[in-house]
Structures are given as C-alpha cells and as structure tokens.
Amino acid sequence: MTGTASSSFLQACQGQVPARRPVWLMRQAGRILKPYRELREKTGSILKLFKTPELAAQVTLMPVAMLEVDAAILFADILTPVEPMGCQIDFVPGPVFAKPVQSRADIDALSTIDPQAQLPYVLETIRLVRRALPPGIPLIGFAGAPFTLATYMVEGGGAKEFTRFRRLLHADQGAAEALLDKLTEVTILYLKAQIAAGTQAVQLFDTWIGALSPALFAQLALPRLQRIFSALEGLGVPRIYYANGAAHFLDLLPGTGADVLGLDWRADLAQAFRLFGGRIPLQGNMDPCALFADPSAIAAEAERILRQTRGLPHVFNLGHGVHPDTPCDHVKLLVDTVHGYHPST
C-alpha cells in the first residue's frame, strides 16, 4: 500500500476534502482475517494477545496490509484501563468481571492509573506499530467513554440490554456520578499516554450511550466528554467521538468538543451534515450487516453513502464493529469500492 506524509485520513479529520476518500474500519476488523484467527488459536488467550506488544502489533498491522485501509487502529480492548483500577476481568470470550461494581464502597475502592507503570504493553505496542507502518498511514488510539465503561463495570460483563448502571443512577446518583468522574480521569490519563507514545489520532468509543435520554446525556455524559476532549486539546491529534445509538440527541453531539463525530448506521449522514452546518467532519456509517449482501449490493450501498457525502469532510467507515463471520473478500471489496469511487460515474 502507498501513502503520503499528509494522509487522506488526517486531512478529512481536519475538515479538508482529500482527493481520495479515506476509509478505515471500526475496531475488531482484524478478527475476520485468517492470520489473526490462527494467531488467536495458537496463543489460546486474547488477553495474551493484548498484553504481548509484538503480537498486538502484528494484529494492528494486519488490516492495513491485507485490506489496504487508510489508517490502523490499536489492537486493545476498551476495558484495558479498567483492570489496573482494581477490577479483575477475564474474557470467556466476552468480558466477565470477577466482582461487579455495585456500591459506593466499590467505587471508592477503585484507583486512578499510571499508564506508564501499569499499561506499558499498550504503549510499547504503539511504538512498535509506528515503526512498522507504511508512510502516510496513521495509527489511531482509542478508549472507551466513561458511560460505556461504567455500564460494563456495574453489569459485570456483557448483556443484551445494560440496565444496572441506569438503576444505580436512579437509586444513588451520587455514586453513579462518582464512578463516571473516576473513569473520566482515567480516560484522560490513558489517552494522553497513547498520544505521547505515538498515536496520531484518538477515538472515544461510546457503544452504549444510546441508552440515555437526551436529558440524561446532557446532564451526565456531556460534561465529562467535554472534560476529556478539552484535556486533549492542543496535543496535535484529531479527537474523534463515536456515539452508538445516539440519533435521538444528535444535535447535542457537537457540544462534546470532538474534532470528528462518528455515527452509527441508524443516522442519516446527509441530514447530520445539514444539522451541523457542514462544519464538523463525520465518520461512518455503513451497516456492518450490509457486508453480508452480494457484491453488487455492497458496492451500491457504499456508493450511496459516498454520494451523500460528496464534497464534504468524511471518513468512510462502518457504523459499528465488523461481525466476526463477515466474509473477508466482502470487506476488501468495500475498501476497493471506496478507493475507486469517482463522483462522475
């Protein structure tokens, strides 16, 4: 793959309209690739992959080499900074907490973190990837947003519908806010360390933020998101906020202070650009399930999104993570379609 020092991805994040539309894929793109599956089977533990920089770097680089996307995203988990806070986590295969956070005492017992001392493997992975990436292909770091992390911690793992944190919020708002505040500080420390180690953009994933009403988002989540993005201002990297299921408070998202907004497949990108006055670069937002269609339908859906966003600062992406059974050749077709798209055709 070729690239330039001023990548199309970073140009789009800065509000420019690059000659070639950049495309990258949400977290977990590597898991559709055969070399990743073989490596995962060989190591026998996803935690070992996360915590071994040489292996994590290999996985980070795989989508760049095999799918030819325009940016790499760090191979880690959104719960990575939660473990050194005092939460024991296992993956079987999804995250399971040995002891969910259930009370104010549990929250008070959580500590903030020193990423240099407690997460050195993440920072070393970043350094290894930066040395190996082709010129012009940036590395994106990321973290889970406070609300999404809190939902996992209080729930004790994954769930079809996360309700326990909202129950805590209504039963003891002070405790819920104390947890969000602690996670906000941890997120700032973690992302600053990633930037210092060499990431060229950072994204905050808020997978479960759509569970909040507009009023609760404005009251609880928004001020903490503003605190995070404000703390990262002036560090020289684009700051991206991905809000899943947030169409019911789309108008509030520019207030986060993020440089780029990532939207899921439920949102209409053209409408969002109109709502924001075309001033904020957007990322997204093809439905990951569309990749199970036949090749002509995949190309048609990609081109529909490209037409919607013609002449606007846009990074083509899926509207959520890649499903593990997605055909790899369908993903490669998507990337090639975006790269080969010409508005005149």
Image: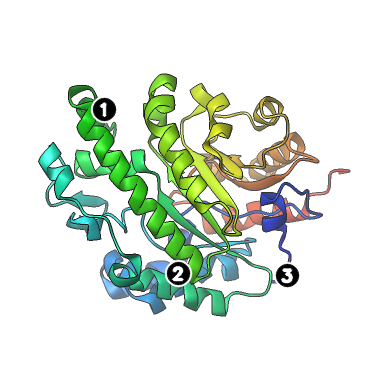
Percent across and percent down for residue 136 are 68, 69
Amino acid marked by disc 1: Arg
Q: Give 294 or 270, whichever is nearer the viewer.
A: 270
- Residue under numbered circle 2: 59
| Quarter the C terminus occupies | top right
Q: Quadrant of residue 343?
A: top right
Q: Quadrant of residue 161?
A: top left
- Residue under numbered circle 3: 5
Q: What secondary structure is found at the residue carrying circle 1?
A: helix
Q: Does residue 237 lie above or below 122 as drawn?
A: above
Q: Give 205 or 345, whichever is nearer the viewer.
A: 205
Q: Work out whether mark 3 precedes mark 1 in sequence or the reverse, and give the earlier one.
A: 3
Q: Work out whether mark 2 precedes mark 1 in sequence or the reverse, and give the earlier one.
A: 2
Looking at the rendered structure, which numbered label has been put on residue 166?
1
Amino acid marked by disc 2: Val
Q: Residue at x 23, y 22 (%)?
A: 170
Q: Work out whether mark 3 precedes mark 2 in sequence or the reverse, and give the earlier one.
A: 3
Return the residue found at the far right: 344
| Quarter the N terminus occupies | bottom right
Q: What secondary structure is found at the residue carrying circle 3?
A: loop
Q: Does residue 85 lie above or below 177 as drawn?
A: below
Mark yes or no: residue 99 visible. Answer: yes
Amino acid marked by disc 3: Ala
Q: What secondary structure is found at the residue carrying circle 2?
A: helix
Disc 2 and disc 1 in contact, CB within 8 angstroms: no
Using residue 176 as the reference point, say whether residue 11 is left or right of it.
Answer: right
